[in-house]
Amino acid sequence: MTTIGLIGAGHIGSQVARLAVANGYDVVISNSRGPETLAALVRELGPRARAGTALDAAKAGDLVVVTIPLKNYRAVPVEPLAGKIVIDTNNYYPQRDGHIPELDDESTTTSELLQRHLPTSKVVKDFNHIYAAELTTHGQPAGSKNRRALVIAGDDKEAKATVTHLLDQFGFDTVDAGLLSEGWRIQRDTPGYGPRRTADELRRDLAAAKRYAAK
Ligand SMILES: NC(=O)c1ccc[n+]([C@@H]2O[C@H](COP(=O)([O-])OP(=O)(O)OC[C@H]3O[C@@H](n4cnc5c(N)ncnc54)[C@H](OP(=O)(O)O)[C@@H]3O)[C@@H](O)[C@H]2O)c1
């Protein structure tokens, strides 16, 4: 894996791009307004980075990160992501995204929606519960005492192993919440959503999470 594509280059996308470049990956970043609006970020990221359309990022990425407002998930290109690992950072905020009935009634989860849109991609939920700024300040080398951990969830074991390795390079331990359908355990307003947590703490948070309806 040499190239990471980013669909979305805002708070989280730009930070993941910084981590990727710092760890020797090439990145293709994209947003909704067009590559020319990303010139400053490309300059900052240096020669490993270029800007393109979302389609370019989807095609170029060996692994692609979707990090856009959830309401726009249907705009993510499907065909070029076939068979690829797709990291989903998205969260559901009805005031921003509008109401999505199947998320309101918790009959599905955000990452399962993206997986349904990308039927042959291997969607892994990640980076959804850490503030963007902390991505480049909270990472520590493997083995550090009290290293911060991040949750992943996904239906494909190999894809999760790849993302676990990537997170380790980026400075974080990983806690596997299980299948995508378990992703609700780290959704907005659950105990693990936001604060700095070690792997053990995060496992406790996942176990203690409650459905919105049970609150
Ligand atoms: N901010 C955080 O700390 C944080 C933490 C964890 C998870 N999240 C979640 O991660 C996602 C991204 O959050 P963010 O804070 O990075 O958002 P953001 O700063 O608003 O950035 C969103 C990015 O997505 C791009 N975009 C929107 N629609 C697009 C489309 N159809 N195709 C390609 N790019 C598109 C935007 O481009 P334009 O600017 O050109 O429209 C922008 O670059 C959200 O679901 C959020 O809830 C955020």
Image (spheres, rainbow, N blue to C red):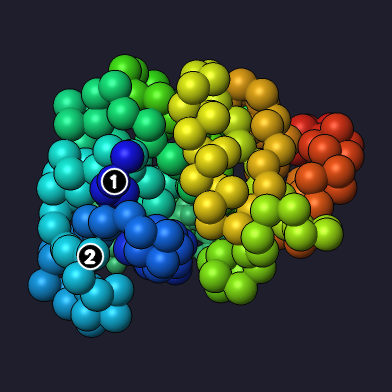
Dot 1 falls on a residue whose secondary structure is: loop
In the rendered image, residue 35, in percent from the top left (x then y), is placed at: 13, 66
Q: CA distance from mark 1 to mark 2?
A: 12 Å
Give whichever of 42, 143 is nearer the camera: 143
Residue, x 71% and y 38% (percent of image)? 175
Query: Given the image, on which type of amino acid does mark 1 rest?
Result: Thr
Q: In the figure, 60 relative to 43: above or below?
A: above
Q: Are marks 1 and 2 in contact (CB under 8 Å)?
A: no
Dot 2 falls on a residue whose secondary structure is: strand
Query: Given the image, on which type of amino acid does mark 2 rest?
Result: Ala
The label shown at residue 49 is 2
Whether the residue carrying mark 2 lies under 8 Å from ligand 1 is answered with: no
Residue, x 59% and y 49% (percent of image)? 168
Residue, x 14% and y 54% (percent of image)? 53
Q: In the figure, 3 relative to 184: above or below?
A: below
In the rendered image, residue 57, in percent from the top left (x then y), is placed at: 20, 48
The label shown at residue 121 is none
In the rendered image, residue 79, in percent from the top left (x then y), is placed at: 17, 26
Q: Which residue is mark 1?
A: 2
Please state if 65 lies on the left or on the right of 32 as rendered. right
- Mark found first going from the N terminus, 1 or 2: 1
Q: Quadrant of the C terminus?
A: top right
In the rendered image, residue 60, in percent from the top left (x then y), is placed at: 17, 44
Please state if 155 lies on the left or on the right of 190 as rendered. left
Q: In the figure, 74 relative to 182: above or below?
A: below
Give whichever of 197, 165 is nearer the camera: 165
